[in-house]
Image (spheres, grey):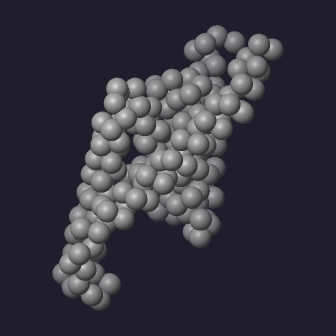
Amino acid sequence: MSKKTRKMTLSALFAAMCIISLFVASVWPTGRFGLVAFASLFVAAAVIEAGISSGISVFIISSIIGMLILPNRAAPILFIIFFGYYPIAKSLIEHIKGELLQWVIKLALFNTATIATWFFMRELLLDSMGNRPLFGAELPYFPLALPIVGSVVFLIYDYGFTKLIWFYINRISKFMKKGNNI
């Protein structure tokens, strides 16, 4: 099998697995965040096995198909806004020298997405509610607490995601390469 064919096949396989995970997340709302985060592991696997361009392909294909065919749009929207692109960004950021700089960039990326989503959703919800207070109460400190609490949750997520990537590299990836020699 040529390298180009292998790369395309792996991208298609990982995109299919990602869409299946997003489908489960869209019909099983209790584990939505976890299942969407799990779907991002397939983007990471594509990056590991076939490079950044394959990871980008898996992210784009999964996002488009997810938005087109899934019964509930919340899972693909979470995937697009927070989890889907992160394995690609993480791979690029972790090639930068200086661990402190890496963390600053990761947190800036996360907080930018979080705050932009907050203001977009706030405007969308308040506009649809006739500018009444959100959920019946004013939330004056919520925009300030969101980045702080979100950053702590993000750091825990990044740590766990790194451990899962290392598990994939050390336990699963070697079987992917072994199958290539058949």
Asked whether residue 154 is in view, the answer is yes
Q: Position of residue 50 (x, y in %)?
A: 56, 23
* Viewer-side residue, 38 vs 57: 38
Look at the image and tell me whether residue 60 can be seen.
no
- Which residue is more in the foreground, 168 or 57? 168
Give above or below for 91 relative to 33: above
The residue at the far top in this view is 2
Image coordinates for residue 155, horizontal then vertical, percent = 43, 52
Residue lying at the far bottom of the rendered structure? 136
- Residue 89 falls in image quadrant: top left
Residue drawn at (52%, 29%) of the image = 47
- In this rendering, would 25 be left or right of 153? right
Quarter of the figure that contains the C terminus: top right
Tell me the residue at 24%/68% (across/down).
Answer: 144
Q: Residue at x 59, y 25 (%)?
A: 49
**Image coords of residue 147 (percent x, y):** 30, 61
Does residue 153 sit above or below 168 in this rendering? below
Which quadrant of the view contains residue 177?
top right
Find the residue positioned furthest to the right: 182
